[in-house]
Image (cartoon, rainbow, N blue to C red):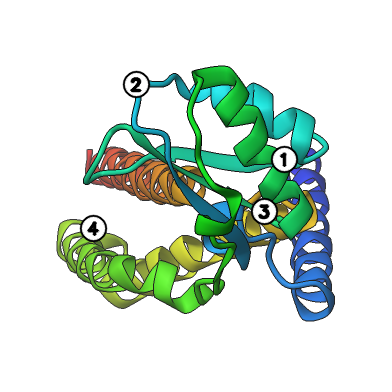
Amino acid sequence: MKKISNKIKVLIIVIIILLIAGIAVVATKGFNVGLKYNETKKVEIEIGKDFENSDIKKITNEVLSNQPTIIQKSQLNQNDVTIMAKEITDEQKTNLVSKINEKYGTEINADDVQVQLVPHARLRDLVKPYILPFAIATVIIVIYAAIRFHKLGAIKTAIKTIFFLILTQGVLASIIAIIRLPIGRTTMILVIAVYMLTATGLICNWEKKLKQKKQESDIKNA
């Protein structure tokens, strides 16, 4: 029992350290927002011919010094390409157009291509669509836990469920901030996965405790 208690103490210390470190990183550096959601520069080039993103990627790696880029075909015209990067100078724009002309035998005028500034997306705007679904799911889980495991103490079970759902998300957020994982779609999938695993783990734990309580009661009444 003492060994288990020591393990729990170590776990609590690790969690506290992670939370403090995460808060410190967010306070000083903020989260690492992915390129798609950060302030970027972009150029839209009308190639007028079918192209492969991989070929454009080779050109951007050469011209933009291998900096991270997003390359997309236009939704309106699949023969137009949009190139996004943290920084695109006028000289780099001219070189991009020159390389594309050389690759596809086109005669695109660099003066007709503008470098546009794309403002960063606010973190709360990225999270906002998930707030209501998470809130509804949490309410359902808490009510279910309170009713299903009322013999363990409805209020106690509800409070513990809320606490651990919040705690695991807090720890995850701290880890994301500390390791500088870019915020984006993948991150939200990770958040949802951890949330579901936590909820499932809590329900399984309450079921186990309820079963133990019932067995103890049967033994006592035998």
Residue at 77%, 29% (x, y): give it.
Answer: 62
Mark linked to residue 176 = 3
Q: Quadrant of the C terminus?
A: top left
Residue type at numbered disc 1: Asn
Q: Mark 4 points at which residue?
A: 149
Instruction: Determine whether the residue tagged by mark 2 lies in a helix, strand or loop.
Output: loop
Give coordinates of residue 131: x percent, y percent.
32, 72
Q: Which residue is drawn at 78% across and 44% down?
A: 7
Disc 1: CA contacts within 10 A as few (<14), some (14-19) or many (>=20): some
Q: Earlier in the sequence, mark 4 or mark 2?
A: 2
Above or below residue 190? Residue 113 is below
Compared to residue 218, the image places residue 111 above or below, namely below
- Comparing marks 1 and 3, which lies closer to the viewer? 1
Q: Residue 95 carries which label?
A: 1
- Disc nearer the start of the sequence (1/3): 1
Which residue is label 2 attached to? 50
Q: Give the spatial CA distance, label 1 vs label 3.
A: 37 Å
